[in-house]
Image: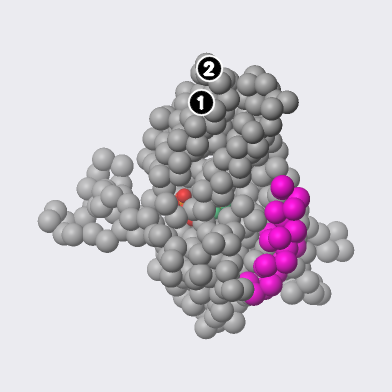
């Protein structure tokens, strides 16, 4: 059975509380945008695609119960609530892009005189609901493109050892995952009837431990041969364990002026530097909903800073000396020149080649 971080049916949204994993699997009800904002901000749900989907679904469930006098009032409420949700976490771009698309839709439906208020509401909600299936389809395509790319890079009977960072799997998306989707597709791949993914290494991903708690949980769940390392072991791993490739996710891939700098979980940048030094191809797997065509370079990406407590404590237990100050940026930016390829639902592209497929993806969506 596949893991499901998001459970939704019309009017009812539940999320798996990721603060409790892997010790407990407990679902929380999200009754509207206030709850949506809180579960995203507290990281009970996290991962760029899951943030956008849960944020938008929290609006969908709230709209089911709300009554409006006219379409203009509905449109204004939608816009206000979406902008509020964008403020929950600043780095991942998916919620912001979804907001822009949904506000455009709300405007179109509002201005179309042939559309009645109930129809406007129903069409708006069904557009949000469609995000779930689209995300799973995108992730499956990302998985297959990524596996194909990596297999082409290692022809013959080479067995593959792949490193990943943070959690990009079913728990970070509607299902299957991005970088972890590539790993799932590689795990299913055979050459001459022999499975070729020998081993996956996942980093612990301090300070929030998405790797140790969530990725390890998904790898064990899927019975993928895998080993946990702490973040500071990556250089040693690359020197001693013959790593074939690194695959990570993205919170925001910048794509103005053919840039391709990528924000992802803190620690990604140092892994990319180490991969360059050890000649290991470093891939970013991300849907086009993570690509930001509006900022000029990675330097303009707002990096979220999280509370000190995530560093000083594990659960209720303090591990850092009292009185020490902390710096806790949740993400860093990997320069495009360190990235071998960006694995998307439309194929694998060099960071400098994203503009054309980005326009194509927008036509598909729009
Ligand atoms: C498919 S998830 C992609 C990224 O969002 C992921 O790599 C990541 O950095 C998640 O960070 P998080 O702080 O756990 O939300």
Instruction: In the rendered view, tell whether residue 342 sits above or below residue 187.
Output: below
On the rendered structure, is 284 left or right of 362? left
Q: How many marks?
A: 2
Q: Circle 2 sits on which residue?
A: 69
The answer to whether the beta carbon of the residue marked 2 is less than 8 Å from any atom of ligand 1 is no
Instruction: Out of 242 and 78, give the one closest to the viewer.
Output: 78
Give residue 14's position: percent from left, percent from top: 52, 27
Query: Badge 2 local density, few (<14 within 10 Å), some, or many (20+)?
Result: few
| Figure quadrant of residue 323 | bottom left
| Figure quadrant of residue 74 | top right
Q: Which residues are magenta?
A: 344-366
Q: Is residue 361 magenta?
A: yes
Placement of the N terminus among the 4 image quadrants: top right
Instruction: In the rendered view, tell whether residue 66 sits above or below residue 227.
Output: above
The answer to whether the beta carbon of the residue marked 1 is less than 8 Å from any atom of ligand 1 is no
Query: Badge 1 local density, few (<14 within 10 Å), some, or many (20+)?
Result: few
Residue at 50% over, 71% down: 297
Disc marking residue 73: 1
Considering the whole magenta stretch, tell me its main secondary structure: helix
On the rendered structure, is 199 left or right of 41? right
Q: Is residue 42 magenta?
A: no
| Residue 206 visible, this angle | no
């Amino acid at each position: 059975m596949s893991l499901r971080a998001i459970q939704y049916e019309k009017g009812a949204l539940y999320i798996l509380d990721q603060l409790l994993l892997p010790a407990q699997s407990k679902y929380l009800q999200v009754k509207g945008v206030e709850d949506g904002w809180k579960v995203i901000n507290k990281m009970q749900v996290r991962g760029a695609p899951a943030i956008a989907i849960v944020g938008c679904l929290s609006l969908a469930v709230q709209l089911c119960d709300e009554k409006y006098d006219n379409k203009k009032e509905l449109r204004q409420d939608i816009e206000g609530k979406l902008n509020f949700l964008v403020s929950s976490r600043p780095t991942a771009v998916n919620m912001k892009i979804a907001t822009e698309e949904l506000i455009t839709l709300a405007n179109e439906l509002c201005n179309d005189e042939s559309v009645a208020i109930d129809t406007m509401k129903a069409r708006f909600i069904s557009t949000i609901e469609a995000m779930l299936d689209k995300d799973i389809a995108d992730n499956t395509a990302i998985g297959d493109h990524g596996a194909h790319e990596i297999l082409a890079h290692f022809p013959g009977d080479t067995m593959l050892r792949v490193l990943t960072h943070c959690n990009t799997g079913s728990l970070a998306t509607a299902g299957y995952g991005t970088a972890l989707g590539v790993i799932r597709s590689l795990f299913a791949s055979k050459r001459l009837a022999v499975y070729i993914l020998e081993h996956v290494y996942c980093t612990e991903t301090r300070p929030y431990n998405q790797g140790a708690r969530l990725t390890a949980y998904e790898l064990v769940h899927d019975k993928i041969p895998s080993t946990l390392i702490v973040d500071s072991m990556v250089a040693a791993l690359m020197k001693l364990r013959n790593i074939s490739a690194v695959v990570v996710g993205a919170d925001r891939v910048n794509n103005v002026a053919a840039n391709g700098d990528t924000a992802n979980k803190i620690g990604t940048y140092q892994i990319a530097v180490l991969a360059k030094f050890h000649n290991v191809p470093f891939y970013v797997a991300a849907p086009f909903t993570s690509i930001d065509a509006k900022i000029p370079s990675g330097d303009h990406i707002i990096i979220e800073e999280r509370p000190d407590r995530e560093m000083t404590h594990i659960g209720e237990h303090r591990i850092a000396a009292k009185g020490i100050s902390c710096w806790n940026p949740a993400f860093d930016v990997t320069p495009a020149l360190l990235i071998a390829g960006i694995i998307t639902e439309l194929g694998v592209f060099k960071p400098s080649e994203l503009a054309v497929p980005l326009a194509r993806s927008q036509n598909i969506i729009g």
